[in-house]
Image (cartoon, rainbow, N blue to C red):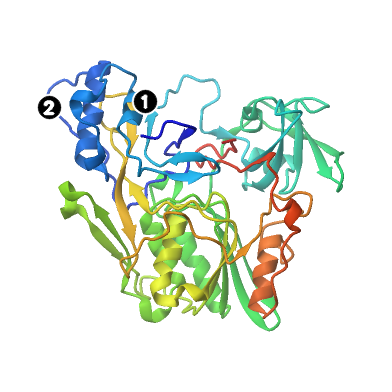
C-alpha cells in the first residue's frame, strides 16, 4: 500500500463520478444497521469487496483493523493501482467523505465564486492568490474581481493570508488587489467583497467564434462535465446543444476546446460533447466502454456517439481539433481525448498546455441513502475507447507545453481573448504558424501550487 506523501482526493475534486447511472447504496439490509465503528467498517468492506475495481487486491479480511476510524479503514483497503504519481506525491482516486452537516453559520456550498492558484511567500507563511477565472453572478464578479488579479490580503492593507480558506468564503470584506510589474507586486486597487453565497458553477464558462484569416474558429471553455445544477436536470446539456447550433450556423470549421481546469464529471456529458466534435461518419459508433470487475461484468456497458438528430443536426464534422489542457485536466476530459482518437487519429488532436492527470477509471457513489455517516466513491470501472485502449494512465503529454502560471513571463488575459497564451498558440497553429515556447529557465516555479478544483465550493486549494 502507498504510505508516503499520500493524497486522498475527495469526490468533489478530481474523483468526479464518471458514469451515467449512479449506485447510491451498497448492501442495504432490512434490519437496523450497526452504526458502531466496527459496523460501519464492515459495511465499507462489503461494498469494496463487491464493487471495487481492484477487488482482488483487497487485504485478507482477518488482517484488517475494524476498530479504526472509517477514513483510515477505507484507506487501508486501497490498491497500489488506485491513483497516479503526481507532483512528487501519490494522487489517490477513490475517496470517502462525511455526510454534510448543516449547522454552520456559513454553509459549505457558499463561495465568493472564483478559482485561483496560490503562490507561497515569506518561506511559506503567507499566500497570494492569482485569479484564474470568476463565475458569473457571483460576489467576486459583483466586486469587480478579474482573471489575472493578484489578491495579497483579505480584510487588511498588507499581505496577511496565512490560511487559504480566506480566499474561499466568508463575510463581507475587502481584497487588496495587486499586479506584477515584472519585478514585484505593486498595489492596484481595493475591492469590497460581498458576503459569500451559493454560486451556480456553470460548466460553460466562455464561448466565442473567432474570425481569423478567413476561418471561423469555435472556442469553448468547458469547465466540468455536469448535466445541470447538482446533476438534477439537463439545463447545461440543453445549453450546450444550443451553443453548438450556433457554432454550426456560423459555419465553424476549426475548434478549440478549453479543458485546462476540467477535472471530469459525468460520462454522459462527455458522450454529448464528443458527439458534437467527432467526424460525422463516427456518429453511432462507440464513444467509450466501461468495464467493471469480475463480480459485476453484467454491468459493463458502452456508450455510443449520439446521432445527428439527437444533436439537433449540429455535429461539426471536424477532421482535427485543438484542445487546451492543464495540470488538473482529468477523467471525463481525458475520456473525450481518448474517445476521439479512433475517429480523428491522435495526430489530428493537438494538445496545448500541460500534462493531464491520467485517470482512465471511474467511480460509483455508495451510502447516500444508508444510515451510515459516510459516502463512498470507490473506483469501480475502467474506461476504454472504441479501439479498446485506455493507455493514458500517465496522462496525455501536450504536443506543445505551455505553463500559464509562469507569472514572470505570462499575463493571464481574459479567457477567449485571441492573445491569451494557450488560445493564441492554437490560433497560430490553425493558421500554419509555429510554436513559441516561454523561456525554459522560468517555465516552472516551485513556489506555485496548482489549483485543486472543488466544484461544489468553487475554491482553490494547495496540494
Q: Is residue 110 left or right of residue 312?
A: right
Crowding at dot 1, Cα within 10 Å, few <14 / some 14-19 / many 20+, comes out as some
The one of 12 and 197 positioned closer to us in this rendering: 12
**Which residue is depicted at the point 45% across and 58% down?**
334
* Residue under numbered circle 2: 30
Q: Is residue 192 left or right of residue 338?
A: right
Sequence order check: which comes first, mark 1 or mark 2?
2
The one of 183 and 198 positioned closer to us in this rendering: 183
Q: Is residue 189 above or below residue 213?
A: above
From the top left corner, tell me how far across and down residue 358 is, in percent. 45, 53
In terms of secondary structure, where does tag 1 sit? helix
* Residue under numbered circle 1: 71
In terms of secondary structure, where does tag 2 sit? loop
From the top left corner, tell me how far across and down residue 181 is, in percent. 87, 47
From the top left corner, tell me how far across and down residue 339 is, in percent. 39, 66
Q: Is residue 58 above or below residue 201?
A: above
Visible in this render: residue 268? yes
Q: Quadrant of the C terminus?
A: top right
Amino acid at each position: 500500500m502507498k504510505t508516503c506523501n499520500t493524497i486522498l482526493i475527495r469526490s468533489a475534486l478530481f474523483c468526479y463520478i464518471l458514469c451515467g447511472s449512479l449506485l447510491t447504496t451498497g448492501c442495504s439490509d432490512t434490519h437496523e444497521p450497526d452504526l458502531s465503528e466496527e459496523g460501519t467498517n464492515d459495511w465499507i468492506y462489503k461494498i469494496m469487496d463487491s464493487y471495487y475495481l481492484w477487488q482482488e487486491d483487497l487485504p485478507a479480511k482477518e488482517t484488517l483493523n475494524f476498530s479504526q476510524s472509517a477514513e483510515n479503514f477505507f484507506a487501508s483497503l486501497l490498491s497500489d493501482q488506485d491513483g497516479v504519481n503526481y507532483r512528487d506525491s501519490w494522487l489517490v482516486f477513490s475517496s470517502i467523505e462525511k455526510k454534510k452537516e448543516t449547522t454552520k453559520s456559513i454553509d459549505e456550498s457558499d463561495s465568493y465564486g472564483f478559482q485561483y492558484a496560490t503562490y507561497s511567500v515569506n518561506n511559506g507563511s503567507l499566500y497570494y492568490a492569482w485569479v484564474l477565472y470568476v463565475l458569473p453572478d457571483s460576489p467576486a464578479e459583483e466586486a469587480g474581481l478579474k482573471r489575472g488579479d493578484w489578491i495579497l490580503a483579505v480584510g487588511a492593507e498588507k499581505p496577511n493570508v496565512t490560511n487559504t480558506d480566506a480566499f474561499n468564503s466568508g463575510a463581507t470584506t475587502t481584497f487588496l488587489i495587486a499586479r506584477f510589474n515584472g519585478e514585484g507586486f505593486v498595489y492596484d486597487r481595493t475591492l469590497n467583497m460581498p458576503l459569500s453565497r451559493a454560486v451556480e458553477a456553470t460548466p460553460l464558462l466562455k464561448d466565442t467564434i473567432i474570425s481569423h484569416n478567413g476561418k471561423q474558429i469555435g472556442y469553448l471553455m468547458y469547465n466540468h462535465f455536469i448535466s445541470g445544477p447538482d446533476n438534477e436536470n439537463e439545463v447545461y446539456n440543453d445549453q450546450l446543444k444550443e451553443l453548438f447550433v450556433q457554432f454550426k450556423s456560423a459555419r465553424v470549421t476549426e475548434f478549440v476546446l478549453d479543458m485546462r481546469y476540467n477535472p471530469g464529471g459525468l460520462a454522459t456529458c462527455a458522450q454529448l460533447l464528443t458527439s458534437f466534435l467527432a467526424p460525422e461518419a463516427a456518429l453511432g459508433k462507440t464513444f467509450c466502454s466501461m468495464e467493471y470487475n469480475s463480480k459485476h461484468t453484467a454491468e459493463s456497458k458502452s456508450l455510443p456517439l449520439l446521432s445527428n438528430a439527437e444533436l439537433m443536426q449540429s455535429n461539426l464534422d471536424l477532421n482535427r481539433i485543438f484542445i487546451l489542457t492543464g495540470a488538473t485536466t482529468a477523467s471525463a476530459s481525458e475520456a473525450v481525448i481518448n474517445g476521439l482518437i479512433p475517429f480523428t487519429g491522435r495526430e489530428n488532436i493537438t494538445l496545448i498546455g500541460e500534462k493531464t492527470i491520467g485517470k482512465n477509471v471511474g467511480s460509483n457513489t455508495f451510502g447516500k441513502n444508508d444510515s451510515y455517516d459516510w459516502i463512498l466513491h470507490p473506483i469501480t470501472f475502467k474506461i476504454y475507447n472504441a479501439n479498446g485502449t485506455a493507455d493514458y494512465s500517465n496522462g496525455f503529454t501536450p504536443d506543445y507545453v505551455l505553463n500559464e502560471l509562469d507569472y514572470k513571463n505570462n499575463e493571464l488575459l481574459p479567457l477567449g481573448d485571441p492573445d491569451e497564451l494557450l488560445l493564441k498558440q492554437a490560433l497560430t497553429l490553425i493558421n500554419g504558424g509555429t510554436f513559441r515556447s516561454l523561456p525554459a529557465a522560468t517555465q516552472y516555479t516551485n513556489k506555485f501550487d496548482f489549483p485543486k478544483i472543488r466544484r461544489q465550493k468553487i475554491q482553490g486549494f494547495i496540494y
